[in-house]
C-alpha cells in the first residue's frame, strides 16, 4: 500500500533514476569514497555529489548513513541495480 510507511519508502526508491540507484548501490559499500564511486561508474566526483544531493532530497535525509538506513528499512538495498547494469 502506497500510503503505508513501507509503501512510502518503496515509492521514494522507485523515483530514483537508474544512475541514482547505481550510486546508492555503491554508497552501501562503506569502503568506497565519492571519488571511487565516480570511478566505478565512469562519472566525475561532481556528478556523484549531484546524484547524492538528489537522493538525499528524495529520501528526506542529510547524509550517507541516513541514506543507507532509509534504503535498508525499505528492504531495497539488495535489489538496487548494480552499476554494471546501468546505461
Image: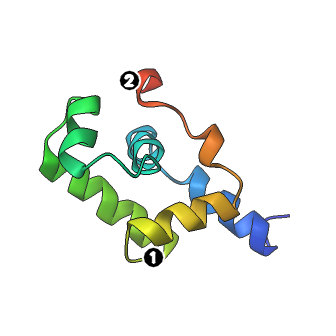
Looking at the figure, which quarter contains the N terminus?
Answer: bottom right
Mark 2 or 1: in front is: 1
Q: Position of residue 47 (x, y in %)?
A: 19, 48
Identify the residue at horizontal 47%, vertical 43% (top origin). 25
Up/down of 17 relative to 53, above or below: above
Identify the residue at horizontal 32%, vertical 59% (top origin). 52
Where on the picture, by quarter, is residue 83?
A: top left
Q: Which mark is residue 3?
A: none
Identify the residue at horizontal 38%, vertical 45% (top origin). 23
The residues tagged by marks 2 and 1 sit, at their Cα atoms, a distance apart of 26 Å
Mark 1 — residue?
A: 61
Colour setup of the view: rainbow
Q: Secondary structure at mark 2?
A: loop
Q: Earlier in the sequence, mark 2 or mark 1?
A: 1
Crowding around mark 1 (Cα neighbors within 10 Å: few <14, some 14 to 19, many 20+) is some
Looking at the figure, which quarter contains the C terminus?
Answer: top left
Mark 2 — residue?
A: 87
Crowding around mark 2 (Cα neighbors within 10 Å: few <14, some 14 to 19, many 20+) is few
Taking the image as shown, residue 12 lies to the left or right of residue 22, namely right
Where on the picture, by quarter, is residue 41?
A: top left
Amino acid at each position: 500500500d502506497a500510503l503505508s510507511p513501507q509503501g512510502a519508502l518503496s515509492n521514494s526508491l522507485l523515483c530514483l533514476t537508474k544512475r541514482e540507484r547505481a550510486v546508492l548501490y555503491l554508497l552501501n559499500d562503506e569502503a568506497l569514497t565519492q571519488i571511487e564511486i565516480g570511478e566505478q561508474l565512469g562519472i566525475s566526483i561532481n556528478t556523484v555529489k549531484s546524484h547524492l544531493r538528489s537522493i538525499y532530497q528524495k529520501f528526506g535525509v542529510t547524509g550517507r548513513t541516513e541514506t543507507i538506513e532509509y534504503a535498508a528499512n525499505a528492504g531495497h538495498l539488495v535489489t538496487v541495480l548494480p552499476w554494471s547494469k546501468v546505461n
